[in-house]
Image (cartoon, rainbow, N blue to C red):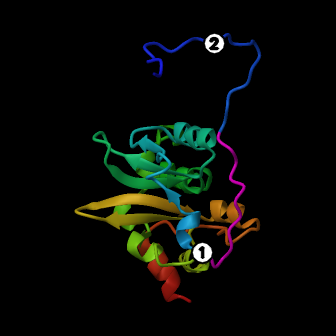
Amino acid sequence: MEHEITTIPLVNVNPGISCDRPHPEEVHVGENDPAITVMTDFTKIIPVTIEADVSLAQALQEMRTHGIRLLLVSDGQDHIIGVITAYDIQSEKPVQYAAENDIAVNEIKTAMLMTPLEQTPAFDFDFVKQALVRHVIQTMKELERPHTLVIETKDVQCIRGVFSTSRISKLLGRPVYQPLHAAHSLADIQHEIGNH
């Protein structure tokens, strides 16, 4: 008969030990692998969000802490209302916004510079499940975007994940398209596509 555990025994801890960490992604993928293999899947990785009234400096620090270049912006009820990227914060956008609205750059909040959710390019998860990595790369090149959201619709829509050209580059082991500048809204993107 097995001994039933009622309490968990303690162990002696040695000074100077290290913390365990997630293992870096060692898997390399190819362009003909399923697109889902390069998607950041929010059913497996907790998305990093930031509140709408947070300063740009705090948003950038949050990105650096998590090693990412895009944050989902949430309102007071934890609903996602937009996205903000490192490009948005580090480009000329804050200076232009400050000049146009007669405020100091350090007074700008994430909500002021974010791309609203309804203007953010997004893929349908049902199509992503059928697509290959090369399809994602090609579409992101045409959009001239380093990130796209992935939307899954069950009873209601939810953000299932995100594609990032920097993560795809890392997994492929070679650089893929990285825009020098990014279109900021759906209108900009449609204008860009219309000019090609």
Q: Work out whether 174 lies above or below 3.
A: below
Q: Give the range drawn in magenta.
A: 22-32
Q: Answer yes or no: do the residues labelled 2 and 1 have beta carbons within 8 Å? A: no
Pointer 1 residue = 133
Instruction: Please report the residue visible at 56 percent of the width from the left and 39 percent of the height from the top.
Output: 62
At which x and y percent is residue 159?
Answer: 38, 58
Separation of disc 2 and disc 1 at Cα? 46 Å
- For the question of whether residue 184 can be seen, the reply is yes
Residue 43, horizontal then vertical, whole percent? 43, 52
Judging depth in this view, the residue of 149 and 32 nearest the camera is 32
Between disc 2 and disc 1, the foreground one is 2
How busy is the neighbourhood of tag 1: few (under 14 within 10 Å), some, or many (20 plus)? many
Task: Name which of mark 2 and mark 1 comes first in the sequence.
Answer: 2
Secondary structure, mark 2, is loop
Q: What residue type is labelled 2?
A: Val
**Residue reaching furthest left?**
155
What's the residue at 64%, 41% (across, down)? 22
Q: Image height check: is 146 above or below 71?
A: below
- Residue 183: percent from the left, percent from the top? 53, 69
Q: Disc 2 designates what residue?
A: 11
Tag 1 secondary structure: helix
Say if residue 100 shows up in the picture: no
Does residue 109 sit above or below 12 in this rendering? Answer: below
